[in-house]
Image (tube, rainbow, N blue to C red):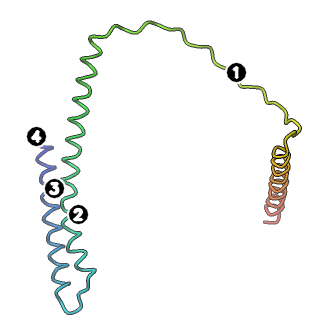
Amino acid sequence: MSRVLLIVCVCVLSLLACSALAWWQWDRFTSVGGSYQNLGYVLQWPLFGLFPAFMFWRMRTLRARARAEEGRTEATDATREPPARTAVPAPRRAAARVPARTARDPEDAALAEYNAYLAELNAREQEENRHGDDRA
């Protein structure tokens, strides 16, 4: 019970503090140098003050929903038969790498040429990086 009381106190203090900040921003808005940004803050601070209360409410509803789900699954699990034991399948071996085939289709040839070009660019960049590390 003390935890709930603490949460309620934090929510009330948050609302009071943010309401005071909203009032301060209202005073700034109505002053000679006030701007519409101050008016935006007037509307924003109360939302910040209500946020802890909203989060407390949201956590309670989610917790209640989870408990209800657990109750439903436990009730249905009690009426079900236990699942039959099954053997664990053997682990699969990784497929052997198949060497690249020659391209028969023109699109495959273009793709293979493009991949070779990318590999060449990568090798060139790796070589430049290696030389750059040696200089430093």
Query: Cα distance, mark 4 to mark 1?
Result: 57 Å
Which residue corresponds to mark 1? 93
Frontmost of labels 4 and 3 is 3
The amino acid type, in three-letter code, at marker 3 is Cys
The structure residue drawn at horizontal position 26% and vertical position 33%, both measured from the top left corner, is: 66
Q: Earlier in the sequence, mark 1 or mark 3?
A: 3
Which residue corresponds to mark 2? 48
- From this viewpoint, which residue is outermost toward the front? 106
**Residue 67 x/y as whole percent:** 23, 30
Query: Cα distance, mark 3 to mark 2?
Result: 10 Å
Query: Cα distance, mark 2 to mark 1?
Result: 56 Å
Q: Is residue 89 left or right of residue 93?
A: left
Q: Is residue 51 above or below residue 81?
A: below
The amino acid type, in three-letter code, at marker 1 is Arg
Which residue corresponds to mark 4? 1
Q: Residues within 10 Å of mark 3 (few under 14, many from 20)?
A: many
Q: Is residue 82 above or below residue 109?
A: above
The structure residue drawn at horizontal position 34% and vertical position 7%, both measured from the top left corner, is: 81
Please, what secondary structure does the residue beneath circle 2 have?
helix
Q: Residues within 10 Å of mark 1 (few under 14, many from 20)?
A: few
Q: Earlier in the sequence, mark 4 or mark 1?
A: 4
**Residue 64 x/y as whole percent:** 20, 35
Please, what secondary structure does the residue beneath circle 4 have?
loop
Q: Is residue 77 left or right of residue 16?
A: right
Which residue corresponds to mark 3? 11
Please, what secondary structure does the residue beneath circle 3 have?
helix
Q: Earlier in the sequence, mark 2 or mark 1?
A: 2
The structure residue drawn at horizontal position 84% and vertical position 41%, both measured from the top left corner, is: 105
